Amino acid sequence: EIVMTQSPATLSVSPGERATLSCRASQSVSSNLAWYQQKPGQAPRLLIYGASTRATGIPARFSGSGSGTEFTLTISSLQSEDFAVYYCQQYNNWPPRTFGQGTKVEIK
Amino acid sequence: EVQLVESGGGLVKPGRSLRLSCTASGFTFGDYAMSWFRQAPGKGLEWVGFIRSKAYGGTTEYAASVKGRFTISRDDSKSIAYLQMNSLKTEDTAVYYCTRLFYDSSGYVMDVWGQGTTVTVSS
């Protein structure tokens, strides 16, 4: 089973600043990595797939990078609506039995 | 608008059964694999199982934690996916999400999520 580890657990950022979230896989998942955003009381929303492809309707301030075992989600200039929990998920080995534990982006 | 709406959640006693429904609209339901996920209170996301489209046999796979107790099915004529949950345990308490899957290179990505339905298993 591939283990996904996200860091940090919590990221405190001021609006307008850049946020950088990390996700590490216990073995290579190639570029088969997705990022999801979840706000309190809401369902997750797909942000990025294929490690770097933005999903439909996702603003350009969200970008993903990486391959193999190391991945990064960058939010270039945080807006108020971006404060949420972010999950990474590999789909190189399907089904995706595991997600990362999540990174909470909170207002500094 | 592409949309998934779950229903059927509620309070149920341990050992009992419950059936969740996921009603799809805005896309050709039969063309897509569908999956169920759940999220226990204050916890992360857990995959429950999925069902392929009929074009790929309509077969199913399940997480070890629910295999033998949960069954996923689909009615393409009604654009509904179902999650039949039997022998429920307190640890099945969670918000259950239905998702649409699209295939990207090596596996499926969950590109559309329902709003979730809450299942509480308690005596």
Image (cartoon, coloured by chain):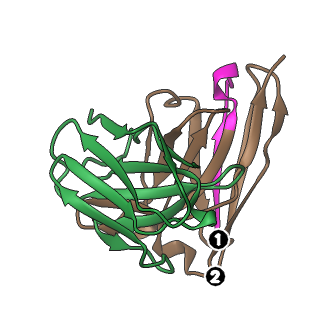
Chain colours: A green, B brown
Amino acid carrying label 2: it is Gly
> Quick one: A51 or B66, which is closer to the camera?
A51
Q: Position of residue B8 (x, y in %)?
A: 79, 48
Looking at the image, the residue that sits furthest to the top is: B123
Tell me if I can see residue B61 in this picture: yes
> Quick one: A100 or A98, which is closer to the camera?
A100
Q: Chain of mark 1?
A: B
- In the image, B60: left or right of B95? left
Amino acid carrying label 1: it is Ser
Q: Residue under label 2, please give it.
A: B26
Mark seen at residue B79: 1
Q: Are the numbered discs 2 and 1 placed on the same chain, yes or no? A: yes
Residue at position x 32%, y 73% in the image: A53
Among numbered discs 2 and 1, the one appearing first in the sequence: 2
In the image, residue A79 sits, relative to residue B19, either above or below, namely below
Q: Which residues are magenta?
A: B79-94
Residue at position x 36%, y 46% in the image: A95
SS of the residue under disc 2: loop
SS of the residue under disc 1: loop
Q: CA distance from mark 2 to mark 1?
A: 10 Å
